[in-house]
Amino acid sequence: MTESSRTNRREFLGNSAAVIAGGVVLPRTALSYSKTIGANDRIALAHVGIGNRGRDLDLIASKLKDSHHVEMVAVCDLWTVNRDKAAATNNAYYGRAPRAVQHVDEILSMKDIDGVMISTPEHSHSPILKMVAEAGKDAYVEKPMGNVMAEAKAARDAVLQANTITQVGTQHRSEPYQKAAHQIARSGALGDVSKVEIVWNYHGPRWRGRPEVKQIREQDTDWSKWLLTKPARPFDPQMYFEFRLYKEFSSGIPDQWMSHAIDMVHWFMDDDFPVSSVSHGGVFAWHDGRETADTFQTLLEYPKGFLVSYSTSFGNDAPSFTRYMGKKASLINDGGEGSPRYRLVEEKGTHEDDSNIDEKRKSQVVLLPGETKLPPLGIDDLTTEHMANWFECMRSRQQPHVTVHNGFAHSVACMMAAESYWTGKKVFWDAKNETITDSNPTQT
Ligand SMILES: NC(=O)c1ccc[n+]([C@@H]2O[C@H](COP(=O)([O-])OP(=O)(O)OC[C@H]3O[C@@H](n4cnc5c(N)ncnc54)[C@H](O)[C@@H]3O)[C@@H](O)[C@H]2O)c1
């Protein structure tokens, strides 16, 4: 970055939009939870569902074991192979073998567990979160928080009732570049935002071809407990590991990717529930028996008066981006999920009057204080800040960065997008009754 662009950036961002690196402190909950973990007490963790993402979460937690004084004391997975692996890995991380059990009930009855991490497939997030809250334990639950309305509500209500500390796993809210960009979005620097456009692409038969499909045997797991709330059916190893492709278990692109994207929009725009959603898409790129779309787009209207377009294609990897389009400036996030590279671009003139207008618009990369290097176009899923925030909140009993209210809101947006896609209808959010309807509740 040149000196002049640095100066311009300062002028352009102004004082109110100064980049930040610090944490966001949320108010204490109205009800103060009686359980306290002393500053010197070790936090005892358990973990349910330790596959691909679960292994990431175990690594993340282990990186914080000394700074946050935590230990994984119990692991739980229905499948022997993943359970044994998790026990061995955590033994290596902590120098002590965790208890290893097959069923979540066994975890819930362990009195010494303070917090439970949940990284099972998405159809079991809400049901397990509800059980964990009812057992009075804190939770870190992967996204989406839920994908069946009644189950997501029941989980949220159970957490509120028990007043436990629950962090929902949209981890980008805790990352420093996202926090800096959030501060800019909230500063007024963009002017009125009327549109948010999100395009996250990938080239390939995403979510097909999991190697575990050939490895797993029915006798080494508990299929009925994997199905949990779903009707019985013969064992299906593809459904077991490629659940993202089967509509009864996942909406695919909305549950997997849009949950992250829309959670960021809710946070940047301070607007939580869509008014309506219209979706379209299909299986156009990978005819491999998948049920969920490989090409998907939804439009969501929000109460503050802006439209969000979310679009993903698995048939072409054209560059991904997110852009907040305001009357004074655009905030552009180059790259897909979690990319830390943001630019603030002045909104001046029009292409119709000046075809070179792009070159005349001031454009500033968002950098953290002290940073001079352009941040990368993407990051992995291994950032530690979100988990650290959960541990800190478990001690302070303050609310974490992504509460069950936020998790419920991203789940509602994803469920609306999916329902519109499957029904072919425009759907509305009835906030009073907390239901998705196909008639506008404000006009009935
Ligand atoms: N936050 C992120 O960036 C991120 C990244 C990847 C995945 N995820 C989320 O993680 C979740 C898991 O994805 P994955 O690819 O790791 O799945 P996976 O199939 O690799 O792992 C799931 C594990 O859970 C176990 N399991 C299933 N039901 C169980 C139950 N009722 N009790 C105990 N164990 C059970 C399975 O045996 C398996 O070992 C998904 O819902 C996904 O949305 C989040």
Image: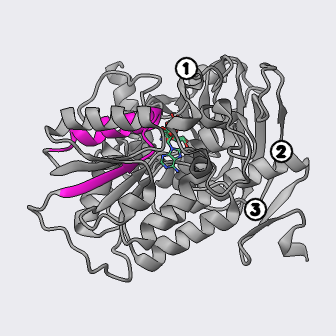
Q: Position of residue 180 (x, y in %)?
A: 39, 44
Q: Residue at x 71, y 43 (%)?
A: 251
Q: Secondary structure at mark 3?
A: loop
Q: Nearer the viewer, mark 1 or mark 3?
A: 1
Residue 442 shows in this picture: yes
Spot the residue most to the bottom: 31
Q: Residue drawn at (58%, 47%), measured in percent from left and top?
A: 226
Query: Is residue 56 visible to us here?
Result: no
Task: Give the Cα separation between the discs numbered 1 and 2.
Answer: 30 Å
Vertically, is 240 above or below 284?
below
Q: Amino acid at mark 1?
A: Pro
Mark 1 surroundings: few (<14), some (14-19) or many (≥20) residues within 10 A: few
Which residue is label 3 attached to? 275
Q: Spot the residue most to the front.
A: 219
Looking at the picture, how far across and down is residue 123, in whole percent? 62, 50
Which image quarter: residue 366? top left
Q: Residue at position x 84%, y 58% from top?
A: 427
Per the image, the residue denoted by label 2 is 421
Q: Quadrant of the C terminus?
A: bottom right
Marking on residue 211: 1
Q: How is the image coloured?
A: one colour
